[in-house]
Image (cartoon, coloured by chain):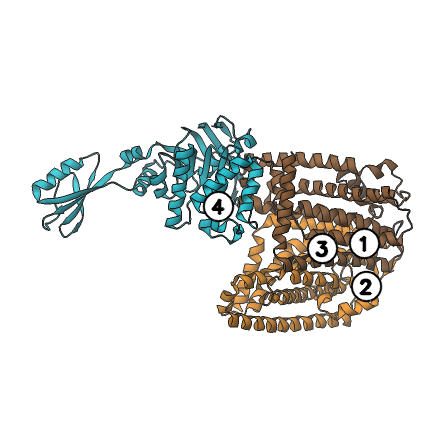
Chain colours: A orange, B cyan, C brown
Amino acid sequence: MRMDWELARSGYRRYAAYPAATVAGVFTNTVFGFLRGYVLLALYEHRDVIGGYDASDTLTYTWLTQGLIAIVYIWGWQDLAVRIHSGDVATDLARPVDPLRAGLSFDYGRALYHALFRGVPPFLVGALVFDLTGPSNPLVAVAFALSVVFATGVSYAWRFLYNSVAFWVLHYRGPAVIAMLVANLFSGFIIPVAFFPDWLKTIAYATPFPAMVQMPIDVFVGKADGIEVLYTLAVQLAWLVGLLLASRAVFAAGTRRLVIQGG
Amino acid sequence: MIEVEHLEKRFVAWQKRGVLRRERREVPAVDDLTFSVAGGTVCGYIGPNGAGKSTTVKMLTGILVPSAGRVAVGGLEPSRQRIKLARRIGTMFGQRVQLWWDLPLIDSFELLRHIYRVPAARFRENLATFRELLELDPFLQTPVRQLSLGQRVRGELTAVMLHDPEVLFLDEPTIRLDVDAKERVREFLTEVNRERGVTVLLTTHDLADIERLCNRILMIDRGRLIYDGDVDDLLARYGGERTLVVDLEEPVAPLEVPGARVERVDGPRQWLRFRRDETSAAAVTAAVAQRAKLVDLALEEPDIEEVVRRIYTSQPRESQPPRSSLL
Amino acid sequence: MADSVRVYLWLISAAIRAQLEYRVSFALDVIGMFLVTFLDFVAVLVIFHNVPQLGSFTVAEVAFVYALSAMSFALAEFAVGHLDALSEMVRTGSFDVMLARPRGTLFQVLAADFRVRRLGQLLQGAAVFVYAVGALDVPWNAARIAMVVVTVLFGAAIFSAVWVFVICVVFWAIEGREASSAFTYGGQFLTQFPIEIYSQWLRRFLAYLVPMAFVSYFPSLYMLDKEDPLGLPSFLRFSAPIVAVGAAIVAGAMWRFAVRHYRSTGG
């Protein structure tokens, strides 16, 4: 437990060490918030409600995703794959810590830093300039926070999973990029899943990706309310546990292969 | 060939004072440097880390613009005539690879030929010479990223000479090489200096480089020049102590000789250290011969490592008041 | 000058050769890139699932604008995308190595690598373009086709100029590189759609300040024979070349200024 805390602290500090990069990132996120906001607003010229979202909901969605980008970290992340290929993973395995758990703790530390310094600022800007929808009561806000925590974990497990491909494949960048893109689309990061045609929506919800972005947003904006909030959280938790187990299994298979082949 | 007059370079550094305030400080990296290096010299530029060596070299090659003072390399002003000067000089910055990583070595040479506009015939000639001198043929077609460190350095040396530069600026060229490879680099540089009259300015921490290669030493510490002269003069001035190794007919107790002290005894052999300015080898030898039966002797000069250390430590360490100005 | 071009072309071929060395990786990358932008376009289609048109532009017309933007940006990214690595070059000292060579630094930075994979995106843009042209009822002739090629080339030039301009921030703050994405990738995002849907200040910004509206919007108005819903003067439709040249000049000046700053304070 102490170890987890220490790892989380390292994760936090590693990203806190580059404040200028954070500022630059906040700038870009904010700019994109405006850009995407405008494009999505154009849709409401012809309709009042799309996929159950009104204009204010959609704007809130936009600014939340801009804030959540860094926290949930849907981008390309290949740290583990690089370590597998360089052989550094062997040192990780020799340590008395489970690599998945260690990575998860580290990532939560990072997520906290990003939440404070890259998540909140763009959203605040959006909230000041536009008329956004907020959580209807404090309990919902708490549920939202919990939802984000789960979302981060789901994202990390997914990243861990597709990085493990590196145990088998020499050119992991291709699959990694594809994995990231698929996650991007189906998580609702590019366009709300609610806007998808029904058949695509069904596919999306059969995957863990909406749990990374769409579900926390639904909680925040109130699309899931009352008992549905609990249901959403439960689904996220289920995906989290499921993906973690899958990652662990795949990683174990990979390390077995590593040991047999001699790295 | 290289003329430097009252050269100065000041950097602005921000220092934290407390939680939020920051103070602006001007740090002199190079302070009132004056020296000149004649064409054809191999000059060693030494000094502790952070002394201002890289900064000086950057100003000589046109990368950095001086804060004050005058610089001329081959009659050209580096910061104003960067491109014109670049054609006539070659640079090798220790850790930075100037070859193209993914391409075969020969492709890098071809590229450099075009970049430096080397006439085809001259290029072929130079390439042939260096291929032989540095034994490049086995790996000429290999991508640079697959070369060993030693092979890469040989490639870099070729690359730096292909356009017939008049001056070479080398930053730690032998760092991390094994003994064999270091020797090769030194041989190459000596050859190039002798055959083509190339002026070489090399920064190094390796004192063997200095002993083997340099006929001139510039030493810098904290932005100031603290020694400017040739290697022998360096040894003579700061050489300090020498050692007379005497082989006696039979072991005796440590000899007591005026002006010298026995550093070590090993059977019939004794090592006597004496200061150059206090006595002479002849006097010590005579004194030893009076006290014991002398069979053989040898004289050891101080090594340059010791010399350099002496110079570093002999510098007055007055604390410099920081030149600061608040924002 | 002529041999600069020769060196440049030589380097492009060398980069392609080097990257083709890894055939599998390259193929995967091209596929990956195709998917990236395809998914982008899927997002656009999803939008249109919900609304019949965007501003005064129909689906096919938006696809047209989108395609022009995508092709121009793919070409720009191929040529100058490597600028994103400038922060690394400055940090590791590779940029200093370039300063010690008898060539312009911008040339050397651009010639250092080419993102060959982006050519896959060029294909994707072309695919969308073919779809758009098929769905529209616009008379096509040789002149119009030539105009498409020219538009894409000048569009790429405008994007490239913007890229050069904003990447100069790293000479002041290395970590500022991420901020440049707001303009480069942000610009790409914006030009996918007709600027009509943006607010007035943003439209003016894109037309007069960072002139990316000339990449896809204005040329589209001409090629689609559309009335400008904003009522802007019609000469703007042909102004892409001049704008491109102007942008290149400004970008070049900015680069020189930035390098001068670097040489007096950093190195």
Closer to us: A131 or A165? A165
Element type at mark 1: helix
Up the image or down, B1 lies above or below A171; here it is: above
As measured in the structure, the alpha-carbon distance from the residue carrying label 3 to the one carrying label 2 is 20 Å
Q: Nearer the viewer, mark 3 or mark 2?
A: 2
Chain identifier of the residue bearing label 4 in the image: B
The residue where tag 4 is placed is: B155
Q: Nearer the viewer, mark 2 or mark 4?
A: 4
Left or right of B95: which side holds C168?
right
Q: Amino acid at mark 4?
A: Gly
Callout 4 and callout 3 share a chain? no
As measured in the structure, the alpha-carbon distance from the residue carrying label 1 to the one carrying label 4 is 47 Å
The residue where tag 3 is placed is: A66
The residue where tag 1 is placed is: C128
Residue drawn 79% across and 41% down?
C150
Element type at mark 2: loop
Does label 3 or label 2 sit earlier along the sequence?
A: 3
Looking at the rendered image, the quarter that the N terminus of chain B falls into is: top left
Residue drawn 54% across and 59% down?
A10
Left or right of A233: which side holds B97?
left
Rendering quarter of residue A67: bottom right
As measured in the structure, the alpha-carbon distance from the residue carrying label 3 to the one carrying label 1 is 28 Å
Q: Amino acid at mark 1?
A: Val
Q: Amino acid at mark 3?
A: Gln
Closer to us: A75 or C93? C93
Image spot of residue B151 (x, y percent) = 46, 49
Up the image or down, B242 lies above or below A88; here it is: above
The residue where tag 2 is placed is: A196
Q: Amino acid at mark 2?
A: Phe
Element type at mark 4: helix
